[in-house]
Image (cartoon, rainbow, N blue to C red):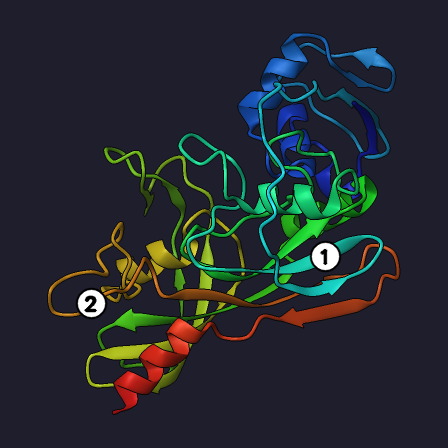
Amino acid sequence: MKQQFEVQEALAGERLDKFLAQIYPEQSRSFFQKLIRSGQVSVQGEVITKTGASVEAGDLVSVEIPAAQSVDICPENIPLDILYEDDDLLIVNKPKGMVVHPSAGHYSGTLVNAVMYHYADSLSGINGEIRPGIVHRIDMDTTGSLIVFKKDDSHLNIAEQIKAHTVRRVYRGIVCGVLRDDEGTVSGDIGRHPTQRKKMAVVTRNGKPAVTHYRVLERFSRYTYVEFILETGRTHQIRVHMSQTGHPLLGDELYGGTSKNYAVPGLQGQTLHAMTIGFLHPSTGEYVEFQAPIPQYMEDLLKRFRK
């Protein structure tokens, strides 16, 4: 699939591989470096094979995205909680325990298996066979609002908004311990943990800037109910930042939220909900915002803590 983009002034002087990685946030720079070296990227009609080449404002960049490797991703009749739908996209309220797209060990029961059944060929193909219509993701045990795209141009439009950090994302969660301040900001570059490859961490090298704002909604004897607003959207961002403060998300096995002092029997994974998502609609240009209701398991926990 061949796509062409005009370089905007804000990205003038950017490395070619980095420019493409910003256009396609689901792909890595190394992915585009391979495409450049293999002659699948051109600037102003000229094939470029140097990954460090820069682009200038007004340049037309063409890239040939190879077809996704064929895999057996079967449509599955899994119910979807649709919060909103139009010709461009749908907003899905993802349940706890559902993986967004197929990966090693999770080739069935995912959100992609479900949308492939209900929407067949009506999905954006930007991210290939494995992630049709998917521009962003939330973790398996995080619940809440997720955008799925039907059209390629709408997909690319929102991908640009995500890169520009203009998409509004508000989360609700319960953390271990009692936060002192009513509100605050946690910042710190996030990258892969140096020794534990399944984890992300606040790092001093090779990380990406990450900023999380929080506001206390309610305090309990051992827990705090918190609202989070993402200024950036890094992998595991809220989970990493709250662990860094000493207040990991309740139930988060990976980042310390299951210690015996805070354990809740029967709780599955981190207590985190992607409640609100807002953006400029790709067709109308108007700001739209959608809310996923707090999941029942979290409501039950809050009631228990209030007692």
Which residue is at a point 62% across and 55% down the rendered structure image? 165
Q: Is residue 10 visible?
A: yes
Is label 2 in contact with label 1 (beta carbons under 8 Å)?
Answer: no
Compared across the picture, whether 78 is left or right of 173 comes to right
Which residue is at a point 67% across and 41% down the rendered structure image? 116
Vertical side of 234 occupied by 56: above or below: above
Say which residue label 1 marks. 90
Q: Which quadrant: the C terminus?
A: bottom left
Residue 210 rendering spot, x and y as whole percentages:
46, 53
| Mark 2 vs mark 1, CA separation in Å | 35 Å
Which amino acid is tagged 1?
Leu
Vertical side of 159 occupied by 305: above or below: below
In the displayed orientation, state which residue is furthest to the bottom. 307
Of the two numbered discs 2 and 1 in the rendering, the one whose residue sits closer to the viewer: 2
Label 1 SS: strand
Residue 277 rendering spot, x and y as whole percentages:
63, 65
Vertical side of 95 occupied by 51: above or below: above
Compared across the picture, whether 267 is left or right of 51 comes to left
User: Crowding near pointer 1: few (<14 within 10 Å), some, many (20+)?
Assistant: some
Q: Mark 2 or 1 closer to N-term?
A: 1
In the displayed orientation, state which residue is furthest to the left. 260
The quadrant where residue 33 appears: top right
Say which residue label 2 marks. 265
Compared across the picture, whether 297 is left or right of 115 comes to left
Residue 177 rendering spot, x and y as whole percentages:
22, 74
Asked whether 118 or 34 is in front, the reply is 118
Which residue is at a point 20% across and 79% down the rendered structure image? 222
Compared across the picture, whether 175 is left or right of 91 comes to left
Residue 267 rendering spot, x and y as whole percentages:
28, 64
Q: Which quadrant: the N terminus?
A: top right
